[in-house]
Amino acid sequence: MAAPLNEADLADSAVAATETETEQQTGKSSSRGRLVARRFFRNKLALVGLVVILLFYVLAFTYSWYSPWGYDELDPAATLMPPDGTHWFGTNQIGGDMFAQTMRGLQKSLTIGLLAALFSTGVASIVGSAAGYFGGWTDRVSMWVVDLLLILPPFLIISILSPAFRGKTWLILVGLIALFQWMITARIVRGMTLTLREREFVKAAKFMGQSPWRIIFKHIVPNMASLLIIDATINVGVAIIMETSLSFFGFGVQAPDVSLGTLISAGSDAVRTFPWLFYIPAGFLVFTVLAVNFVGDGLRDALDPSSSRSRRKERKRIEEKTKSSASTQPVGAEA
């Protein structure tokens, strides 16, 4: 006896039928990548977020090509000058060009956020899937480490350790931030792995003699791609906020280098008298985090067609198409 279909199953069946009908009409078979891209590009907020991130990356890494000032250059004759044609974002208390410094800070914050997110999500996927698949002492030791790191206050630990690495490479800061970002995701991945390892395709791969790590990376982790991508995008924003907070209190990026956190910290005392010192880097920080979150939502809907937002959009599109077909159907067609 067939099991009853719920609303999600009916929506997914309708989506699949519509996409199959479209493919038959065009005579082309869409790959999964093309299907995901089509879903993603239908999300306007995700597109806006992607454009903003790409634009910020281009601005941050190419500003030295067209900016008349470097981030470490000073103009003693123009201290605390508002934005004008010479200094596009104005200058700070010592004559530093705010445009160049903001672009340099954006470059540093984006790089730290991206690297920390990739590292933490990668560690979470490996540790969580290994703990759930192997079980036994691997699971116990992994979860013991996770529980230990979860009870430690990350901001306090990084603040204590940061002075010991002052003057060293900023990649150490990336490692410290990533060290406290992967534990909750690892627990979620472990729970999903406990379910996936009992599925037929995993048992078939094990029966065919595939190694455990091959099964993990080929069959288990790809089935959690939606979760991991969402986690990575969220971690980008979280890492940027953490780096900004650490730099704001003097524990992150150190002078003479700059980040959005150091710029916001330097401009916070003059927010009323010289607002461009604070609001310009703070605005870039806000728009960067919002854009990352929009892209994460768009990727979630594109990779997981069963998500509620994706189902609503697909049902609306199907209803509109059905109404359009009904309105154009000839009067005597049913007869």
Image: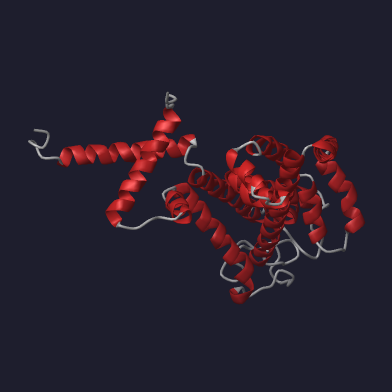
User: Split into 4 quadrants, where in the image is the N terminus?
Assistant: top left
Please give the name of the residue rendered at 53% of the width and 44% of the height, measured from the top-left corner.
Answer: 300
Q: Is residue 46 visible?
A: yes
Q: Is residue 144 above or below residue 123?
A: above
The answer to which image quadrant residue 99 occupies is: bottom right
Viewer-proximal residue among 230 and 23: 23
Viewer-proximal residue among 320 and 59: 320
Q: Is residue 244 visible?
A: no
Q: Position of 329 compared to 303: left or right?
A: left
Q: Is residue 242 above or below residue 104?
A: above
Q: How far from the left and from the top, in percent, is residue 156?
A: 85, 42
Q: How far from the left and from the top, in percent, is residue 101?
A: 69, 64
User: Split into 4 quadrants, where in the image is the C terminus?
Assistant: top left
Q: Position of 42 compared to 134: left or right?
A: left
Please give the name of the residue rendered at 22% of the width and 41% of the height, measured from the top-left corner.
Answer: 324
Furthest residue toward right: 164
Q: Position of 185 compared to 335: left or right?
A: right
Please give the name of the residue rendered at 10% of the width and 40% of the height, measured from the top-left corner.
Answer: 330
Q: How far from the left and from the top, in percent, is residue 135?
A: 77, 37
Q: Position of 124 compared to 300: left or right?
A: right
